[in-house]
Amino acid sequence: MNTISLLRLLPILIILPILTACSSSPDDEDIVIANKGAEALYEDAKRSMEVGNFSQAAATLSALDSRYPFGPLSHQVQLDLIYAYYKSNKTDECLATIDRFIRLNPNHSDVDYAIYMRGLVNMGSDSNFFQDIVGIDRSDRDATQARQAFNDFKGLIEKYPNSRYAADSRKRMGHIKNRLAKYELAVARYYMKRDAYVAAANRGQYVVEQFSDTGHVQEALEIMVECYEQMGLQDLKNNALQTLRLNFPESSYVN
């Protein structure tokens, strides 16, 4: 091979090993993780959590959970991973980790914490931070996540009444009850606008029966009175009106 041909090939020969190395080398972070033991990785994750870097903590804990799924730190790693995902707003990953922990460790001493966190995650998924800040009432938005959160907290209290998370769960259930009652009334008003009085009255009755300890019973009874009036159901109207009169004599429907 002459000198000119060799000079033409030289840049290619130099570049090829570089490309090969780049394509076959894992990320630097993967190399660091691969070279560390479980304890060292867990310390890294704790430091990340202490400074509020929950995304990094979640990444480290997830790698630790994958590499050492049956190690002595495995349960604590999963519990910390739940919290890190929660703080990072990674809802799907958090719920999946919670459900896996509960399924595999039904008798663990911290299973009540996992159930509590599932309630927090579902409750957080139901809220809209921007709308809360500007005071927009969106009580008509879908309440599926709120119901799930309510059931999570209810299940925690029923199964672990002495849990350290029971008292806060009860408070949150009260908040969710108000949210669900407002949703039912919003749906009832929607039905009334469309002359679907049977459906609207049923929603009002549901609020009276299921959310009697909220501040929305008066409106529910008023909806029932109006719907029964529209349908010509005088006996049902009188019964609802009597209940309204006894409990809320200041109602305009009574006077």
Image (cartoon, helix red, strand yellow):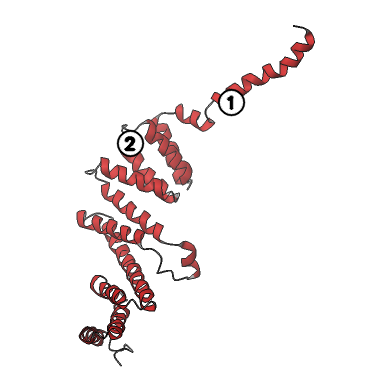
Q: Residues within 10 Å of mark 1 (few under 14, many from 20)?
A: few
Comes first in the chain, label 2 or label 1 = 1
Q: Residue furthest bottom?
A: 255
Determine whether 194 is above or below 25 in the image. Answer: below
Determine whether 233 is above or below 12 in the image. Answer: below
Q: Residue furthest top?
A: 1
Disc 2 marks which amino acid? Ser
Q: Evaluate whether residue 233 shows in this view.
A: yes
Q: Quadrant of residue 171?
A: bottom left
Q: Evaluate whether residue 212 shows in this view.
A: no
Where is residue 206? Give x, y as percent.
26, 72
Where is residue 183? Give x, y as percent.
36, 69
Q: Residue at left 40%, top 48%?
A: 92
Q: Name the residue nearer the viewer: 191 or 204.
A: 191
For the C terminus, the image quarter is: bottom left
Q: Which residue is mark 2?
A: 74
Q: Quadrant of residue 220?
A: bottom left
Position of residue 1 in the picture relative to residue 103 (left or right): right
Q: Residues within 10 Å of mark 2 (few under 14, many from 20)?
A: some
Distance from the alpha carbon under mark 2 to that under mark 1: 33 Å
Disc 1 marks which amino acid? Cys
Where is residue 24? Give x, y as percent.
54, 24
Q: Which residue is mark 1?
A: 22
For the N terminus, the image quarter is: top right
Q: Quadrant of residue 121?
A: bottom left
